[in-house]
Amino acid sequence: MSVLTVGLSHRTAPVEVLEGVALDQDAVAKILDELPTSNHLAEAVVVATCNRLELYADTATFHGGVDEASTLLSAHTGVPVEQLTPYLYVHYGERAVSHLFHVVSGLDSMVVGETQILGQVRDAFRLAQTSGATGRGLTELFQTALRVGKRAHAETGIDDAGRSLVTLGLARVMPSVAVEGWAAGRLGGATWRELVRGTRALVIGAGSMAALAATTLQREGADVVVANRTPERAERLAASVSGRAVPMSGVPDALDDVDLVVSCTGATGVVLPYELVEQAAARRGGRPLGVVDLALPRDVDGDVGDLPGVVLADLSRLSEAADDDVADASSLAHDVDAVRAIVTEEVAGYATARRVAQVAPTVVALRTMADDVVDAELSRMAGRLPDLDERSRAEVSTTVRRVVDKLLHAPTVRVKELAAEPDGASYEAALRELFALDRRSIDAVARPDQGAQDGRDA
């Protein structure tokens, strides 16, 4: 079995396409529930975030796995395969492992170094576990990946180098929003944190991204108002940031008073339509309003950015800003290189461990076969020498088993050492051929709960 990744992200698809394939947790669960009917995918984890949709699977065949993974994504997003394919990327084997390690380390994010993706991958893995979609293969892979992500953030300064989507959005809109109350000379050198201080902000939503936005704003000195379709969740989030909650029906009035709006709901339709923002802009009399839309599908009509006094930063605009930021920020280079070195080291270590683990069932099967041969020969000896006393019988048995153990010791230890090499699989195959080991006996050792089924399929 080998790891396969099929997906699309902000690197391969425009925001409009990502909006069309956005999946909530229920939709992801339905994909995982279909896994038992798959012919080629044995395990799966689906990572669905605001700027990526990826299916990781343990597959027996490459082409069959790609076809089934693409079909699953198409069926549950409602986007035909032929429309989805141009934006899909495929990684297999060590490349799939490397891609996952890059993702959890923040190297593949829209904003390099952001930490939220690590929690999102953890949640995706837990959902797959709960759904029964993971086995030994992906469990080991994702546990390793989560450790790699933590190591990358702990051992490098990538956290400080990269900015979250929230902070990137704030940095994008605040210079325009905070014109009032700032002298022209001071504004030019102010950071977004300084500009946020003392502002009034409306956060629409109460999920993880909304909570990140609310806590970031509160930490930097903004007064926070929270609106959400579920009042209890809005009140809970508002209380955590010493703010206040308003119902969704109170959003139009809130738009009159705030300086900034951050919207990140899970709604499937537009939350802030053009007409609503247009009316608010008219009532504000030209007072600037910053709008940061972090939702996918988008919460805010994209045309509101054309309204006088309204500054809009949505995922499409933030993607361009992030690309410019990474290209121009030489301070990122050292930390990015350090994380890449960690990823390279961890991929090599994981691949080595996998090769060694894959040869272990063959070694166990060989020793089991040797034990069976010894038992059969001792039984035959007992029939031929019925008068042999127990002490002599025990001594013969011990001697024969010791001889077999010594003969097998060197080749089994050596094959484990050789398996750690890049071409280690060939040594496992050679051991299997030299001793004529039954493939079914090896599979039974590797997956004892499926041994009977494997035997029937062989």
Image: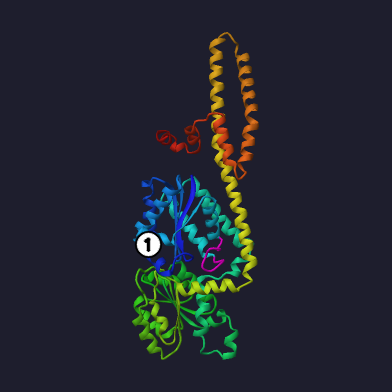
Q: Nearer the viewer, residue 151 or 247?
A: 151
* Image height of 254 relative to 142, above or below: below
> In the image, what residue occupies the spot 50% across and 75% down?
169
Q: Amino acid at mark 1?
A: Gln
* Image height of 191 relative to 40, above or below: below
> Mostly what secondary structure, the magenta segment?
loop
Residue 236, image x and y in percent? 43, 70
Residue that mark 1 sits on: 83
The colouring scheme, among rainbow, by chain, secondary structure or one colour, is rainbow
Q: Is residue 106 magenta?
A: yes
Inspect this view and state whether residue 363 appears: no
SS class of the residue under badge 1?
helix
Q: Nearer the viewer, residue 183 or 231?
A: 183
Residue 72, image x and y in percent? 37, 54
Residue 289, image x and y in percent? 45, 84
Looking at the rendered image, the quarter that the C terminus falls into is top left
Q: Which residues are magenta?
A: 105-114
